[in-house]
């Protein structure tokens, strides 16, 4: 399962595609047993080569600004017909309409499940809620542990204070006896 940050980056990349008027935006969640390469494909189309380059530029700028993340590699930017951006956990494919129909990545990845942007956002929210639940449970455990440690500390302090009081009382008695014995000898 991809991390929350990966899903947020993927959602930001899809939003960048939408902002630059990319067409037919699809997110494919790849089957892990079939693809050890990456977790997701983000596939979209532009109307011409310039738009494809503008889409990839917007994705790169947004992910750099919001997450400090650069693509591992970018292929095909000069031609613009098919631009591939590798972000390790997901790969962005920006096609011209003709190249997308010719290569048909969706057809080649039959075991992949198609996610909508709404599905992706719902998954992000679910992961955030789970993380909040885990952190709440951890903080409750920490509070219980702190309470137990505080009790032990209080018991130790009370024991120490009691011991000191006993030592003081017994030392006072010893001193009194010694003083009384000294007075008796001097008489």
Image (tube, grey):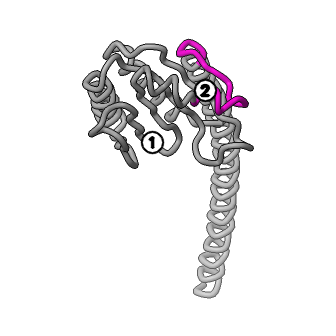
Q: Is residue 136 visible?
A: no
Relative depth, front residue between 20 and 50: 50
Residue 31 seen:
yes
Q: Residue at x 61, y 21 (%)?
A: 123
Q: Which residue is mark 2?
A: 106
Residue 117 among magenta residues: yes
Q: Nearer the viewer, residue 180 or 172?
A: 172
- Where residue 127 sits, quadrant-wise, is top right
Residue 17 sits in which quadrant? top left
* Element assignment for label 1: loop
Q: Which residues are magenta?
A: 105-119
| Mark 2 crowd level (few <14, some 14–19, many ≥20, 10 Å Cα) | some
Work out whether residue 6 or residue 85 is closer to the camera in this orientation and state it: 85
Q: Which mark is residue 87?
A: 1
Q: Is residue 16 above or below residue 170?
A: above
Q: Position of residue 18 (x, y in %)?
A: 38, 14
Inter-mark Cα distance, 2 to 1: 19 Å
In this rendering, position of residue 58 left or right of residue 186: left
At which x and y percent is residue 99?
45, 27
Choose mark 2 or mark 1, whichever is in front: 2
The residue at the point 66 percent across, 32 percent down is: 109
Residue at horizontal 62%, vertical 64%?
168
Along the line of sight, which residue is nearer the eye, 35 or 89? 35
68 lies left or right of 147: left
Residue 112 in the image: state x and y as whole percent. 68, 29
Comes first in the chain, label 2 or label 1:
1
Q: Quadrant of residue 79?
A: top left
Answer few, some or many: residues within 10 Å of disc 1's Cα (few below 14, many 20 plus, some between 14 and 19): many
Relative image position of residue 54 (x, y in whole percent): 26, 25
Disc 2 element: helix
Farthest residue toward the bottom? 185
């Amino acid at each position: 399962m991809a991390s929350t940050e990966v899903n947020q980056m993927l959602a930001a990349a899809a939003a960048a595609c939408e902002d630059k008027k990319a067409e037919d935006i699809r997110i494919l969640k790849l089957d892990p047993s079939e693809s050890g390469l990456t977790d997701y494909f983000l596939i979209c189309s532009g109307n011409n080569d310039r738009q494809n380059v503008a889409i990839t530029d917007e994705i790169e700028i947004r992910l750099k600004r919001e997450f400090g993340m650069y693509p591992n590699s970018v292929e095909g930017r000069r031609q613009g017909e098919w631009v591939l951006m590798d972000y390790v956990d997901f790969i962005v494919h920006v096609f011209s309409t003709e190249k997308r129909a010719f290569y048909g990545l969706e057809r080649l990845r039959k075991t992949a499940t198609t996610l909508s942007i709404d599905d992706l956002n719902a998954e992000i929210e679910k992961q955030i809620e789970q993380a909040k639940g885990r952190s709440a449970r951890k903080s409750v455990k920490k509070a219980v542990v702190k309470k137990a440690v505080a009790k032990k500390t209080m018991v130790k302090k009370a024991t120490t204070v009691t011991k000191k009081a006993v030592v003081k009382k017994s030392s006072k008695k010893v001193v009194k006896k010694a003083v009384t014995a000294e007075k008796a000898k001097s008489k």
